[in-house]
Amino acid sequence: MKKFLSLVLAIAMVMACACFAGCGSKSMTVEEGKLIMVTNAEFPPYEYKEGDSIVGIDAEVAALIAEKLGLELEIADVAFDSIIPGVQSGKYDMGMAGMTVSAERQKKVNFSDSYATGVQVVIVNEGSDIQTIDDLEGKKIGAQQGTTGYIYASKSPENGGYGEENVIGYDSGAVAVEALKGGKVDCVIIDNEPAKAYVKANPGLKILSTEFAVENYAICFAKDNTELQEKVNAALKELIDDGSVKKVIDKYITAE
Ligand code: ARG
């Protein structure tokens, strides 16, 4: 019995050491056969809810990646602001949310290769006196909290923004658009594809033809999880090369 116990103890110790050495570079969930992707499902057509399920470009591309890696995809839905902290802490394996690669974010997380591009645009009410982005000075601007649209707009005028005091952050693009319709803000700065989706769903709105900032979307990972980052990059490359990613994007974004 004593012998058996010490054997169990020895095995446990070996396992603990193995985990100790491996932990940090690998995630437990991936070892258990799961890939947990975190998003903010308030961003059509990249991610949005259809009944209880989360659909969209990111959800489908993530499913293809998981399939290639032989993992079962699980999607978590949180506030956009909580995605990077959740990935940093290892609670989630990767963040995929039409997320723009930026130098600021690169200090906190690593990014995959880019799989899509976005453009920041301005939505206004039809008949608005805002004709171009040069008319935004002194106006009230709405944006989704934590997004690049919010970040650009709230910079000081010397830095190309409109001043934090002029920007109101909302939980989602949809809520920002409601505020625009209700006259609480004069415009909304958001990525072009969700902008098109919101304008289509809400008569009386339009998108200005002047755009600012073309951005690259990529998947983010914890700094110490380069192993998953590399695997996902390899899968993503295959899916881009064989046209699978384009097929998913074309399913949701019809060229007009
Ligand atoms: N591309 C913008 C950014 O990275 C907006 C992304 C918002 N995504 C979302 N799922 N709500 O800041």
Image (cartoon, rainbow, N blue to C red):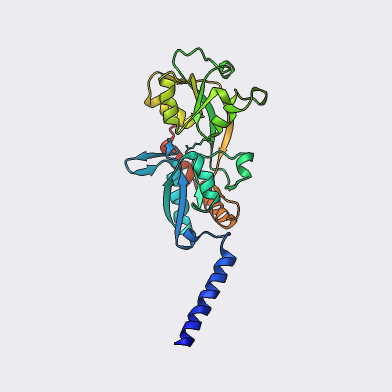
Where is residue 50? Give x, y as percent. Answer: 34, 40
Farthest-out residue, right: 158
Residue at (56, 38) in percent of width and height: 100
Farthest-out residue, left: 51
| Quarter-of-image position of residue 151 | top right
Residue 46 in view here: yes
- Asked if 179 appears above or below 82 in the picture, the reply is above
Residue 256 in view here: no
Q: Quadrant of the N terminus?
A: bottom left
Where is residue 189? Give x, y as percent. Answer: 51, 26
Residue at (55, 50) in percent of width and height: 88
Farthest-out residue, front: 2
Where is residue 99? Give x, y as percent. Answer: 53, 40
Give the left or right position of residue 221, taking residue 33 as reference: right
Question: In the image shown, does 215 or 254 lie closer to the viewer?
Answer: 215
Where is residue 82? Give x, y as percent. Answer: 50, 43
- Asked if 55 appears above or below 18 in the picture, the reply is above
- Asked if 217 appears above or below 211 in the picture, the reply is below
Q: Quadrant of the C terminus?
A: top left
Question: In the image shown, does 60 or 33 lie closer to the viewer?
Answer: 33
* Tag count: 0
Residue at (54, 52) in percent of width and height: 89
